[in-house]
Amino acid sequence: MDKKDTSWESVAPWYDNLLEGDKDSYQRRVILPNLLRIVDASKPARIIDLACGQGFFTALLAKEGREVVGVDLSPLLIKVAAERHREKKKLSFIVAPAHAVPLPDAFADVITVVLAIQNIKNLSETIKETSRLLKEKGKLIFILSHPAFRIPQKTFWEFDEKKDIQFRRVTEYLSESAAVIEMTPGKKGGPTTESFHRPLQVYSKVLANNDFAIARIEEWISHKKSEKGPRQIAEDKARKEIPLFMMIEALRV
């Protein structure tokens, strides 16, 4: 794996500030409550949070009685996570790529991958590794930017003045693609990452090829609302109809 392409080492400070400092972020207001709802229903004893970053979700998954291991390729993010949560006894962190985690077979009841699968280049190897790490009937839960409506540089918000409609324009979907993403748009020379788009059928096939069956799919919308203005109603309606995120829950069979 090309570490330059996939590690979030270069954007670690920015990402840490976003998750810890923004109380109205999508991560905190949309993803976190839904993630906890889904994981809690599984009643896992042991969880791996793959591509865990600085441990924002990992720490909140570590409820009483659970053992949680956070894994990430970035040494800086793992250092931040380990130092910030060092007092939690059953919470630990490992520096490792998603496709080669130094843990034994059938280690976990649940594996979560939150907003990271689209930043992982070697998808097949990573899903194969999660299959190895999960117990029989264990669950893989991954959350990603919606693959139909949030394709970097291929989807855009537009407004139809005649029909008074806010809509999402999709110029490509079925073709797999990669895009360089500026993490601080408008600032020249800022940190970048790479994002990989795959249509839903690619995820379905790679899961099936690695002994997974899709148990559930959910699509999550924005919690935000537009300020008062001539487009407010149309914009708010679009937010309710066009989801930002997709959650796929797959059962290890």
Image (spheres, rainbow, N blue to C red):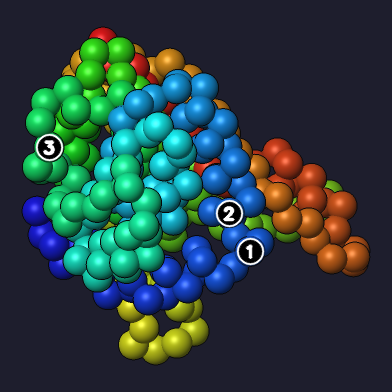
- State the residue at coordinates (13%, 42%): 101
Return the residue at label 1. Answer: 23
Please say if the residues under marks 1 and 2 sit with CB atoms less than 8 Å apart.
Answer: yes
Residue hosting label 3: 103
- What residue is drawn where x is 90% and y is 65%? 228
Q: Residues within 10 Å of mark 3 (few under 14, many from 20)?
A: few
Three-letter code for the amino acid on which mark 2 is drawn:
Arg
**Height in image: 142 above or below 193?**
above
Q: Which mark is residue 28?
A: 2
How many badges with numbers are in the image? 3
31 relative position to 102: left or right: right
Q: Position of residue 195 (x, y in %)?
A: 33, 56
Label 1 near label 3: C-beta < 8 Å? Answer: no
Circle 3 or circle 1, nearest the eye: 3
User: In whole angstroms, how far apart are the C-alphas of marks 1 and 2?
Assistant: 7 Å
N-terminal label among 3 and 2: 2
Residue 77 in sight here: no
Under tag 2, what secondary structure?
helix
User: Horizontal placement of 236 versus 103: left or right?
Assistant: right
User: Looking at numbered disc 3 in the image, what kind of residue is underneath it?
Assistant: Leu
Type of residue at label 1?
Answer: Lys
Q: Quadrant of residue 82?
A: bottom left
